Image (cartoon, rainbow, N blue to C red):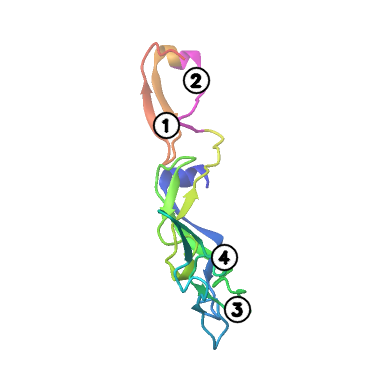
Amino acid sequence: IAFEQSAKGAETAIQIPRHEACETCQGSGAAPGSAPTTCPQCRGAGQLRYQQGFFTVARTCGQCRGAGKVIAKPCATCHGQGTTEQQRKLTVKIPAGIATGQRLRLTGEGEAGTQGAPHGDLYVVIHVRDHEFFHRDGNDLHCEIPLSITTLALGSEITVPGIAGDETQKGPEGTQT
């Protein structure tokens, strides 16, 4: 964003790719007219358990990969994944005073969860372009103004440029550079 946008705050539009529920199968992964069936190997548990004496070992089912359901006829649009990648345009409100490296969290705007779970959060990392006159040091704004030696020695009012407009400051007598 521009330096002025970070100082005053702004709204900006961003476009991101993210996975959305497939419109053809409504996120099920199965072709229209069919439905996922219970996995015959793990019987819907998603795990296979083996008991060896006192020990019980559980591992993820290899047939359904832990989902508990098998898709016999996958959707042609999403190939059984249940999601497709789409471009999404978002409007982001940037608060005044934000700095480079700070993050904004947009709740519910991240990737789609698996098997119909809700969307996660999207984190937007801010990068502020450098300004040709001002530079930021923490919460302070700095600039350099060239003044003549007589102005410094005798003191006078000087005009200082600012983000919101010019301001007049009184320079006391005997001011050092």
Q: On screen, 68 above or below 100?
A: below
Cα separation, mark 4 vs mark 1, equals 53 Å
Disc on the earlier residue, 2 or 4: 4
Disc on the earlier residue, 4 or 1: 4
Q: Which residues are magenta?
A: 134-151
Of residues 129 and 23, the one drawn nearer to the viewer in this rendering: 23
From the viewer's perspective, is the residue at label 3 or at label 4 nearer?
4
Q: Amino acid at mark 2?
A: Leu
Badge 1: residue crowd in 10 Å (few <14, some 14–19, many ≥20)? few
- Judging by the rendered image, the residue that carries numbered circle 1 is 138
**SS assignment at label 4:** loop
Report if residue 148 lies within the magenta region: yes
- Judging by the rendered image, the residue that carries numbered circle 4 is 62
Q: Amino acid at mark 4?
A: Gly
**SS assignment at label 2:** loop
Q: Residue 147: which disc? A: 2
Q: On screen, 169 above or below 11?
A: above
Q: Residue 71 location, x and y as percent?
A: 56, 77
Q: Amino acid at mark 1?
A: Gly
Badge 4: residue crowd in 10 Å (few <14, some 14–19, many ≥20)? few
